[in-house]
Image: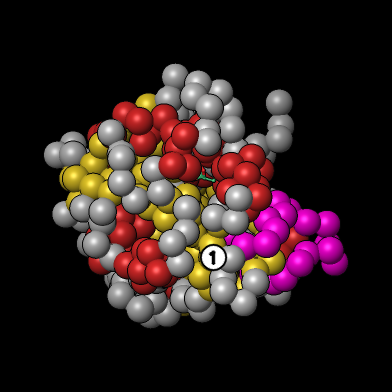
Amino acid sequence: MRAVVLVGGFGTRLRPLTNSIPKPMLPVGQLPIIERLVMNLARGGVTEVTLALGFKPEPFVEAFPSGECAGVALRYAVEPEPLDTAGAIRFAADSAGIDDTFIVVNGDVITDLDVSALVAFHREHGAEATLHLIGVPDPSAFGVVALDADGRVERFVEKPAPGTAPSNLINAGTYVLEPSVLQRIPTGQKVSIERATFPAVVADGGLFAMATDDYWLDTGRPELYLQANVDMVAGRRRHDHCDAVHELASVAADAVLVDSLVGPGAELGAGATLVRSVLLSGAVVGAGAQVTDSVVMGRIGEGADVRDSVVGADGVVAPNEHVHGERRPDPDAG
Ligand code: GTP
């Protein structure tokens, strides 16, 4: 089974982290999101993945120089310009010569979904396209579906106004598609699969959906990216585990870590405390500093107190400074 993984977005909601690293290359549990995602696809029977790339393709090619990731063969399809989700799927599938049932995944999805079960559901229902669904308390920020008793999608509503959603089941970003879906997508232009292609498949009665209660997170927002990491180290995943401290990290003997991760090359100074936080490669936290509910790539001075914040590669917190609810550098400044 072949898959297309969409990794060409700008990742604006994760700025400033994505100023230096594209979102799917950011680590979850010490490995890039894309590697975690491909590992799960491999468990479900996927043997070849085409990465639909646009913005910053180089880090992907450099990270997997052998053209292989988690035992799966990788292909790269680099768009000349961003084509949006459906345009990117068409471009990548054409470049890989896909002509059979295939899988599509958004490159920021972290899930324990058994993809082979989604494929089996798709085949049993004779679907043209099948979505994976997850139930959430507030679906207004997502694509929401209304289903009939057979699992056929009756309506697909992208980001409904609060209180108007037809169900609490949201598009969880993994699809099984027949190649006929590709013929619905015009080439060389921006087309959204959620707004244009799926509604057309619904109109023909060919869109089905399977809801599961598997672990699932869309890592697109900082608090969810942080949660994905904390869940990994806290052992909340079915298959995946990781070490809290990478073997190439430097952590002082008296530093304190609670539900936190320290990545390769990161430094945590003497007496510093890390609670529900992630230090990424390049982060330096000075002695006695306190970091809580934050993601750090930059430098935090001695004795500083950082909470609910995102510090990018160029971000600096001065010694003894208190920083709450900030992004550094501020992605909206200048
Ligand atoms: P934000 O800018 O924070 O919204 O993040 P994003 O750019 O990743 O957008 P979004 O999360 O809506 O995109 C869903 C998935 O589609 C992500 O995995 C993106 O990488 C991918 N994606 C979005 N637009 C494009 C595109 O034009 N081309 C390709 N190849 N992928 C895209």
**169 left or right of 73?**
right
Q: Compare residues 234 and 327 and report the one nearer the observer.
A: 234
Quarter of the rendering occupied by the C terminus: top right
Q: Compare residues 210 and 332 and report the one nearer the observer.
A: 210
Which secondary structure, mark 1? strand
**260 left or right of 205?**
left
Q: Is residue 3 magenta?
A: no
Q: Residue at x 35, y 78 (%)?
A: 238
Q: Using the rendered image of the protein, determine whether residue 212 is visible from the camera's viewpoint.
A: yes
Q: Compare residues 57 and 255 and report the one nearer the observer.
A: 57
Where residue 257 appears, x then y in whole percent? 43, 74
Q: Residue at x 39, y 43 (%)?
A: 179
**128 left or right of 165?**
left
Where residue 67 appears, x then y in whole percent? 18, 39
Ligand 1 has an atom within 8 Å of the beta carbon of the residue at disc 1 = no
Residue type beneath disc 1: Ala
Q: Which residue is mark 1?
A: 209
Q: Quadrant of ligand 1?
A: top right
Residue 287 vs 258, above or below: the answer is above
- Magenta highlight range: 153-174
Quarter of the rendering containing residue 1: bottom left
Where residue 306 appears, x then y in whole percent? 61, 59
Figure colour scheme: secondary structure
Q: Residue at x 60, y 38 (%)?
A: 192
Q: Using the rendered image of the protein, determine whether residue 7 is visible from the camera's viewpoint.
A: no
Q: Is residue 169 magenta?
A: yes
Give neighbour class at mark 1: few <14, some 14-19, many 20+ (Cα, 10 Å). many
Residue 84 vs 72, above or below: the answer is above
